[in-house]
Image (cartoon, rainbow, N blue to C red):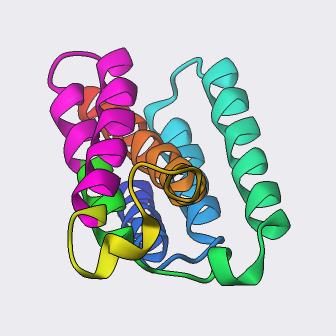
Protein backbone atom coordinates (compact mmCIF):
# COMPACT_ATOMS: atom_id res chain seq x y z
CA UNK A 1 0.00 0.00 0.00
CA UNK A 2 2.84 2.39 0.83
CA UNK A 3 4.43 1.72 -2.54
CA UNK A 4 1.20 2.75 -4.27
CA UNK A 5 0.97 5.94 -2.21
CA UNK A 6 4.61 6.72 -3.00
CA UNK A 7 4.11 6.23 -6.73
CA UNK A 8 0.94 8.36 -6.76
CA UNK A 9 2.64 11.20 -4.86
CA UNK A 10 5.73 11.08 -7.08
CA UNK A 11 3.75 11.04 -10.33
CA UNK A 12 1.38 13.78 -9.15
CA UNK A 13 4.29 15.89 -7.95
CA UNK A 14 6.24 15.49 -11.17
CA UNK A 15 3.11 16.32 -13.15
CA UNK A 16 2.64 19.48 -11.12
CA UNK A 17 6.29 20.42 -11.64
CA UNK A 18 5.73 20.16 -15.40
CA UNK A 19 2.67 22.40 -14.97
CA UNK A 20 4.72 25.05 -13.09
CA UNK A 21 2.86 24.53 -9.84
CA UNK A 22 4.91 25.41 -6.76
CA UNK A 23 3.21 22.70 -4.71
CA UNK A 24 4.42 19.89 -6.96
CA UNK A 25 7.74 19.75 -5.19
CA UNK A 26 5.94 19.32 -1.86
CA UNK A 27 4.09 16.31 -3.26
CA UNK A 28 7.38 14.82 -4.47
CA UNK A 29 8.93 15.36 -1.03
CA UNK A 30 5.92 13.68 0.58
CA UNK A 31 6.46 10.73 -1.77
CA UNK A 32 10.10 10.62 -0.74
CA UNK A 33 9.11 10.53 2.93
CA UNK A 34 6.64 7.69 2.33
CA UNK A 35 9.33 5.81 0.39
CA UNK A 36 11.69 6.26 3.35
CA UNK A 37 9.08 4.75 5.67
CA UNK A 38 8.57 1.83 3.30
CA UNK A 39 12.28 1.26 2.78
CA UNK A 40 12.94 1.57 6.54
CA UNK A 41 16.43 2.81 5.84
CA UNK A 42 18.38 5.12 8.18
CA UNK A 43 17.78 8.13 5.96
CA UNK A 44 17.19 11.00 8.35
CA UNK A 45 20.07 13.10 7.00
CA UNK A 46 18.89 12.53 3.43
CA UNK A 47 15.34 13.54 4.33
CA UNK A 48 16.61 16.65 6.10
CA UNK A 49 18.73 17.58 3.07
CA UNK A 50 15.87 17.21 0.60
CA UNK A 51 13.47 18.88 3.06
CA UNK A 52 15.67 21.97 3.23
CA UNK A 53 15.96 21.97 -0.56
CA UNK A 54 12.16 21.77 -0.81
CA UNK A 55 11.72 24.68 1.60
CA UNK A 56 14.22 26.78 -0.36
CA UNK A 57 12.44 26.09 -3.65
CA UNK A 58 8.99 26.87 -2.24
CA UNK A 59 10.17 30.10 -0.58
CA UNK A 60 11.93 31.20 -3.77
CA UNK A 61 8.83 30.46 -5.84
CA UNK A 62 6.77 32.73 -3.57
CA UNK A 63 9.41 35.46 -3.88
CA UNK A 64 9.45 35.39 -7.69
CA UNK A 65 7.28 37.82 -9.65
CA UNK A 66 3.93 36.31 -10.65
CA UNK A 67 4.84 36.60 -14.34
CA UNK A 68 7.81 34.27 -13.85
CA UNK A 69 6.43 31.88 -11.23
CA UNK A 70 3.26 31.29 -13.23
CA UNK A 71 4.94 31.00 -16.61
CA UNK A 72 5.16 27.62 -18.33
CA UNK A 73 7.31 28.74 -21.24
CA UNK A 74 9.91 26.12 -21.99
CA UNK A 75 9.08 24.12 -18.89
CA UNK A 76 8.53 20.96 -20.90
CA UNK A 77 12.02 21.29 -22.32
CA UNK A 78 13.66 22.16 -19.00
CA UNK A 79 11.83 19.66 -16.79
CA UNK A 80 11.80 16.93 -19.42
CA UNK A 81 15.52 17.21 -20.03
CA UNK A 82 16.17 17.34 -16.27
CA UNK A 83 14.16 14.13 -15.87
CA UNK A 84 16.02 12.44 -18.72
CA UNK A 85 19.38 13.58 -17.38
CA UNK A 86 18.63 12.51 -13.83
CA UNK A 87 17.43 9.07 -14.85
CA UNK A 88 20.44 8.63 -17.12
CA UNK A 89 22.75 9.64 -14.29
CA UNK A 90 20.92 7.28 -11.94
CA UNK A 91 22.24 4.40 -14.02
CA UNK A 92 25.74 5.35 -12.84
CA UNK A 93 25.23 6.55 -9.25
CA UNK A 94 23.24 8.82 -6.98
CA UNK A 95 25.72 11.69 -7.37
CA UNK A 96 25.57 11.40 -11.15
CA UNK A 97 21.78 11.57 -10.95
CA UNK A 98 22.07 15.09 -9.54
CA UNK A 99 24.71 16.10 -12.08
CA UNK A 100 22.62 14.62 -14.89
CA UNK A 101 19.55 16.53 -13.72
CA UNK A 102 21.43 19.84 -13.67
CA UNK A 103 23.04 19.25 -17.07
CA UNK A 104 19.69 18.15 -18.48
CA UNK A 105 17.92 21.28 -17.23
CA UNK A 106 20.62 23.51 -18.73
CA UNK A 107 20.51 21.72 -22.07
CA UNK A 108 16.71 21.79 -22.05
CA UNK A 109 16.76 25.54 -21.45
CA UNK A 110 19.24 26.05 -24.27
CA UNK A 111 17.16 23.84 -26.59
CA UNK A 112 14.03 25.85 -25.81
CA UNK A 113 15.83 29.15 -26.35
CA UNK A 114 16.68 28.02 -29.89
CA UNK A 115 13.02 27.53 -30.83
CA UNK A 116 11.02 30.43 -32.30
CA UNK A 117 8.97 30.69 -29.09
CA UNK A 118 12.12 30.73 -26.97
CA UNK A 119 13.85 33.55 -28.84
CA UNK A 120 12.31 36.00 -26.34
CA UNK A 121 14.61 34.65 -23.62
CA UNK A 122 17.57 35.92 -25.59
CA UNK A 123 20.15 33.20 -25.04
CA UNK A 124 22.82 33.96 -23.83
CA UNK A 125 21.66 36.73 -21.52
CA UNK A 126 20.96 37.42 -17.88
CA UNK A 127 17.24 37.12 -18.63
CA UNK A 128 17.79 33.59 -19.91
CA UNK A 129 19.93 32.65 -16.91
CA UNK A 130 17.38 34.03 -14.44
CA UNK A 131 14.53 32.16 -16.13
CA UNK A 132 16.55 28.95 -16.31
CA UNK A 133 17.35 29.16 -12.60
CA UNK A 134 13.73 29.95 -11.70
CA UNK A 135 12.38 26.97 -13.64
CA UNK A 136 15.36 24.62 -13.55
CA UNK A 137 15.93 24.51 -9.79
CA UNK A 138 12.46 23.16 -8.91
CA UNK A 139 12.64 20.68 -11.77
CA UNK A 140 16.07 19.37 -10.78
CA UNK A 141 15.17 19.09 -7.09
CA UNK A 142 11.90 17.30 -7.89
CA UNK A 143 13.37 14.77 -10.32
CA UNK A 144 16.30 14.05 -7.99
CA UNK A 145 13.96 13.42 -5.07
CA UNK A 146 11.87 11.14 -7.29
CA UNK A 147 15.02 9.29 -8.34
CA UNK A 148 16.09 8.88 -4.71
CA UNK A 149 12.67 7.49 -3.80
CA UNK A 150 12.85 5.15 -6.79
CA UNK A 151 16.23 3.87 -5.61
CA UNK A 152 14.92 3.24 -2.11
CA UNK A 153 11.92 1.33 -3.44
CA UNK A 154 14.02 -0.75 -5.83
CA UNK A 155 16.45 -1.76 -3.10
CA UNK A 156 13.62 -2.57 -0.68
CA UNK A 157 11.57 -4.64 -3.11
Residue at the (51%, 29%) spot, across then down? 40
Q: Please say if 46 is above or below 145.
A: above
Magenta highlight on residue 96: yes
Magenta highlight on residue 118: no
Q: How many marks?
A: 0
Query: What x and y, as percent, mark residue 87?
Result: 21, 39
Q: Please say if 124 is above or below 28.
A: above
- Residue nearest the observer in this picture, 98 or 155: 98
Considering the image in quadrants, where does the N terminus appear?
A: bottom left
Residue at the (84%, 64%) spot, across then down? 63
Residue at the (31%, 34%) spot, across then down? 103
Quadrant in the picture for residue 73: bottom left
Please state the extent of the stretch shown in magenta in the rendering.
Answer: 84-112
Quadrant in the picture for residue 77: bottom left
Magenta-highlighted stretch: main secondary structure?
Answer: helix
Considering the image in quadrants, where does the C terminus appear?
A: top left
Quadrant in the picture for residue 22: bottom right
Query: What x and y, as percent, mark residue 136?
Result: 48, 52
Residue at the (81%, 68%) spot, across then down? 62
56 vs 124, left or right, is right
Q: Please say if 58 is above or below 34.
A: below
Query: What x and y, as percent, mark residue 88?
Result: 16, 34
95 vs 29, left or right, is left
14 vs 41, left or right, is left
- Residue nearest the observer in this picture, 46 or 131: 131
63 vs 28, left or right, is right
Query: What x and y, as percent, mark residue 105?
Result: 35, 47
- Residue nearest the observer in this picture, 94 or 133: 133
Amino acid sequence: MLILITVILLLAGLGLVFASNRYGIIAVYAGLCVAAVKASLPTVSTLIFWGIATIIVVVLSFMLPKSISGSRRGLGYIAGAALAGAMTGLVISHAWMIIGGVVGAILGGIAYSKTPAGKALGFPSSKFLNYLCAKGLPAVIAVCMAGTALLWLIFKI
